[in-house]
């Protein structure tokens, strides 16, 4: 079943080793023998900072992008056992199984909330089927973020509005949902300093309120660092 799906989609089974799981530099396809169009699709998916997985009807992973390889760490509510995707929490096992079955057998879409507390993640389960009477069934899983906005997106937003380093750190904290008093405590400064910095950020970004500012950050495009293998900080310096 896996080989039939991968052949139909122009992809080959993924290889599971530490280099693949850690991510590969942009411009390096996971398989050099992929058809040109499949290579472009693969590279395009790797530039999206949301985890996206393609599963066969047997719940085996046919492909996953760079963000998914990074997201599926020891704390994520989903885990990979070989090529099999499983829920880490026993309470999520049946719900994930039922959603995948509903997608492949009945073409139903589901939005799941998996995991507990700070590691709770929204997962969209979307059925895919090729045209024709013998169309092949697969399922796309799109994973939500465990935080509002990635650090790289915040930094690029800050740079585009000429925020100082201190203001950028305040913006990061606001994007995490922290209150001004909590930010002051984190940074070891007075609340008046944080309020002044927030005022400067709002002025530079033309935001009427903290809520409007956070919304600007929340709807940023899903940015991925150019030097993914070397971390986001290096990508910022090279940008």
Image (spheres, helix red, strand yellow):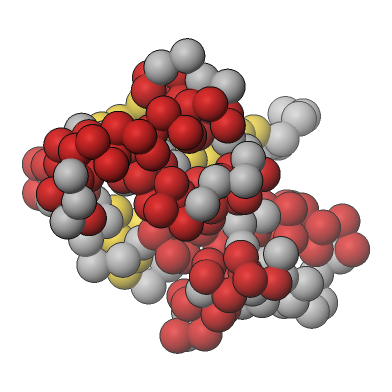
Q: Residue placed at 78% from the left, 72% from the top?
A: 27
From the top left corner, tell me how far across and down residue 6 is, in percent: 66, 59
The answer to whether 102 is drawn above or below residue 76 in the figure is above
Viewer-side residue, 37 vs 173 = 173
Displayed quadrant of residue 96: top left
Q: Residue placed at 47% from the left, 33% from the top?
A: 200
Is 13 on the left-hand or right-hand side of 179? right
Q: Is residue 96 visible?
A: no
Q: Residue placed at 48% from the left, 77% from the top?
A: 22
Image quadrant holding the C terminus, namely bottom right
Viewer-side residue, 132 vs 187 = 187
Is 7 on the left-hand or right-hand side of 146? right
From the top left corner, tell me how far across and down residue 1 is, in percent: 55, 57
Displayed quadrant of residue 198: top left
Viewer-side residue, 113 vs 236 = 236
The answer to whether 80 is drawn above or below residue 182 in the figure is below
Is 136 on the left-hand or right-hand side of 216? right
């Amino acid at each position: 079943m896996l080989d039939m799906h991968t052949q139909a989609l122009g992809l080959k089974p993924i290889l599971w080793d530490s280099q693949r799981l850690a991510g590969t530099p942009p411009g390096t396809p996971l398989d050099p023998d992929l058809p040109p169009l499949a290579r472009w699709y693969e590279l395009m998916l790797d530039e999206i900072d949301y985890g996206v997985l393609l599963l066969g009807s047997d719940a085996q992973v046919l492909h996953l992008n760079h963000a998914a390889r990074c997201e599926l760490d020891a704390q994520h509510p989903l885990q990979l056992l070989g090529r099999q995707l499983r829920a880490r929490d026993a309470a999520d096992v049946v719900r994930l199984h039922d959603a995948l079955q509903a997608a492949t057998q009945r073409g139903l879409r589901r939005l799941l909330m998996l995991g507990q507390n700070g590691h709770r993640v929204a997962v969209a389960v979307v059925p895919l089927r090729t045209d024709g009477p013998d169309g092949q069934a697969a399922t796309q899983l799109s994973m939500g973020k465990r935080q509002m906005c990635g650090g790289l997106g915040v930094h690029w937003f800050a740079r585009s509005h000429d925020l100082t380093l201190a203001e950028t750190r305040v913006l990061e904290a606001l994007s995490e949902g922290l209150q001004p008093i909590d930010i002051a405590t984190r940074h070891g400064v007075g609340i008046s300093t944080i309020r002044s910095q927030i005022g400067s950020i709002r002025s530079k970004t033309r935001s009427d309120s903290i809520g409007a500012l956070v919304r600007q950050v929340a709807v940023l495009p899903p940015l991925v660092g150019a030097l993914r293998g070397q971390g986001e900080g290096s990508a910022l310096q090279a940008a």
